[in-house]
């Protein structure tokens, strides 16, 4: 039985505050950005649309209230703990009832813990939102090493190494004997390694992205068609990925003192990877949501170290889960959102990598599921956990 978080000597409460001086510097750089013109503005085809970015930056300087968002961040129970040498930050929300299920949720790039603000309370306290108390989770949402409010690793860590750190957080630091893991983007890769390497504690995983690959490749006509389509779709997405996986340090020099540069680099992904019409990014995200995530990267000065995970995965061996063809054997739930940028393979392929026990094809939604379609993701996590309880009974 784990200790109460309040009496856990390994953790300390954490609050985040940007100094007034740093905030003024950020806003000054945004306001004084030397805009340049594109020859024949290609909408979003060339990258982040300039007209929209100017609109966002005008809002940033004149209307966006960081202190309101800062207060929202600090309204959650934030903690820090030294885990495997990393100063790890995490949100901790104790679930309702006698036996809430421990659930660790991992974000990815270019996200942060702010992706999950709308689902923390419903997951932990379903009875307050018209649900059943037996569906409650104790929710743990860490900032990944090198991201946001967590300390940076001594060198680039990939998702497998990060999974080891998060398992230590859950077991050694927080004292859980068993837990579930959920994630999208890099969080999906981290969940995969939690289920593969740390199955004695990680009893099941729920993912809303397919990041891993089988060494034998596609085996059917349907699977080969998926691979061909995936490779074609990724051609226009591979630039950032290649840069961050090979020379992240070079990129960081141009970004560290350019809030507008960081905003452009991140906004492009939120536009292109989401289930929105071209130019309609705010049909999925508000300006406040976008800028809060951007400000976390800027104010913590973690744009550089957050990009290291791409370099780390390349060193760890890339997307292949097991050269020997072994799979994740813990029960796996898959939430398949139709506009996921990393196109889902046919279930036949996925089942050679995971012990798929739950498969939901969603009616809508893209890469940032917790922000785009929080109710759909929330419901699927609950349904997956219920199915596991049914098997245990």
Image: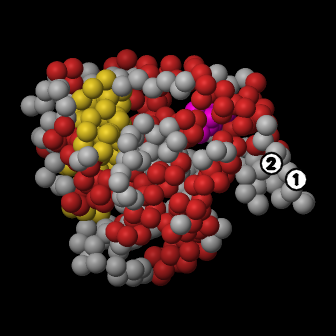
Name the spot of residue 193 as percent of width and height, x first.
28, 59
Name which residue lies at 21% across and 60% down. Answer: 197
Of residues 8 and 285, the one drawn nearer to the viewer in this rendering? 8
Magenta stretch containing residue 107, yes or no? no
Predominant secondary structure in magenta? helix
Q: CA distance from mark 1 to mark 2?
A: 8 Å
Name which residue lies at 62% across and 67% down. Answer: 239
Q: Which residues are magenta?
A: 285-294
Looking at the image, tell me whether mark 1 or mark 2 is earlier in sequence order. 1
Asked whether, in this view, residue 195 is left or right of residue 37, the answer is left
Mark 1 — residue?
37
Magenta stretch containing residue 291, yes or no? yes
Asked whether, in this view, residue 292 is left or right of residue 125, the answer is right
Asked whether, in this view, residue 9 is left or right of residue 192, the answer is left
Q: Secondary structure at mark 1?
A: loop
Q: Secondary structure at mark 2?
A: helix
Mark 2 — residue?
50
The colouring scheme, among rainbow, by chain, secondary structure or one colour, is secondary structure
Name which residue lies at 73% across and 36% down. Answer: 30
């Amino acid at each position: 039985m784990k200790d109460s978080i309040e009496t856990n000597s390994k953790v300390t409460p954490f609050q985040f505050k940007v100094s007034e001086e740093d905030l003024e510097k950020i806003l000054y750089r945004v306001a004084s950005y030397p805009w340049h013109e594109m020859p024949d503005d290609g909408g979003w085809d060339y990258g982040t649309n300039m007209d929209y970015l100017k609109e966002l930056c005008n809002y940033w300087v004149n209307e966006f209230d960081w202190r309101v968002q800062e207060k929202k961040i600090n309204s959650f129970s934030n903690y820090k703990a030294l885990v495997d040498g990393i100063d790890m930050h995490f949100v901790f929300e104790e679930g309702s009832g006698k036996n809430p299920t421990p659930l660790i949720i991992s974000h990815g790039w270019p996200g942060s813990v702010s992706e999950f603000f709308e689902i923390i309370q419903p997951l932990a306290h379903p009875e307050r939102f018209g649900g059943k108390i037996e569906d409650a989770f104790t929710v743990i949402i860490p900032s990944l090493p090198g991201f946001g409010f967590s300390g940076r690793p001594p060198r680039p860590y990939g998702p497998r190494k990060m999974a080891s750190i998060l398992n230590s957080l859950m077991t050694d630091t927080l004292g859980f004997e068993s837990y579930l893991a959920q994630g999208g983007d890099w969080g999906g890769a981290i969940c995969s390694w939690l289920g593969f390497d740390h199955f004695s504690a990680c009893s099941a995983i729920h993912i809303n992205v397919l990041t891993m690959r089988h060494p034998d490749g596609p085996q059917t006509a349907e699977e080969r068609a998926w691979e061909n389509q995936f490779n074609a779709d990724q051609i226009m997405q591979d630039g950032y990925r290649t840069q961050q996986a090979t020379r992240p340090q070079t990129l960081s020099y141009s970004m560290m003192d350019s809030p507008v540069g960081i905003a452009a680099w991140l906004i492009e992904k939120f536009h292109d990877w989401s289930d929105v019409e071209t130019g309609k990014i705010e049909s999925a995200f508000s300006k406040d949501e976008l800028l809060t995530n951007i400000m976390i990267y800027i104010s913590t000065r973690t744009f550089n170290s957050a990009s290291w995970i791409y370099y780390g995965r390349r060193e760890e061996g890339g997307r292949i889960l097991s050269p020997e063809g072994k799979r994740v054997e813990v029960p796996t739930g898959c939430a398949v959102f139709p506009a996921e940028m990393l196109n889902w393979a046919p279930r036949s392929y996925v089942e050679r990598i995971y012990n798929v026990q739950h498969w939901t094809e969603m009616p809508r939604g893209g890469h940032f599921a917790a922000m785009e379609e929080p109710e759909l993701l929330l419901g699927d996590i609950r349904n997956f956990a219920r199915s596991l309880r049914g098997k245990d009974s």
